[in-house]
Amino acid sequence: MKKIKNEKGQGLLEYVILVALVGMVCVSSSKLLGKKINAKIKDIKEHIDSSIPVEVGELAGNG
């Protein structure tokens, strides 16, 4: 059996496949975590909005 003279192409292809798989994992996990983080920030904002009383005059700058 003959040896392949140029094995650099095979190593490069394996590296490209590995980088593509890592990229796909990063994108999918960031989408999933992004939704959870966004929901948590929304909950915090709603809690802050409901616990801090604001008068109408303060909003208009007349306070």
Image (cartoon, rainbow, N blue to C red):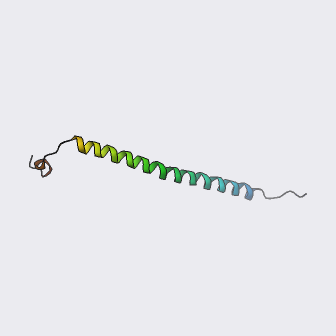
In this rendering, is residue 51 above or below 18? above
> Residue at left 38%, top 48%?
39
Q: Classify the position of the N terminus by image quarter.
A: bottom right
> Residue at left 70%, top 58%?
13
Marker count (numbered): 0
In this rendering, is residue 55 above or below 5? above
Front residue of 43/2: it is 43
> Residue at left 61%, top 53%?
21
Q: In x, y percent, where is residue 45?
A: 30, 46
Q: Is residue 46 left or right of residue 33?
A: left
Instruction: Tell which residue pokes out farthest to the left in this image.
Output: 62
Q: In x, y percent, where is residue 63?
A: 9, 46
In this rendering, is residue 23 above or below 54? below
Q: In x, y percent, where is residue 2?
A: 89, 58
Instruction: Tell which residue pokes out farthest to the right in this image.
Output: 1
Front residue of 4/57: it is 57
> Residue at left 15%, top 50%?
59
Q: Is residue 47 left or right of residue 32?
A: left
Instruction: Tell which residue pokes out farthest to the top in this image.
Output: 51
Q: Is residue 44 left or right of residue 7?
A: left
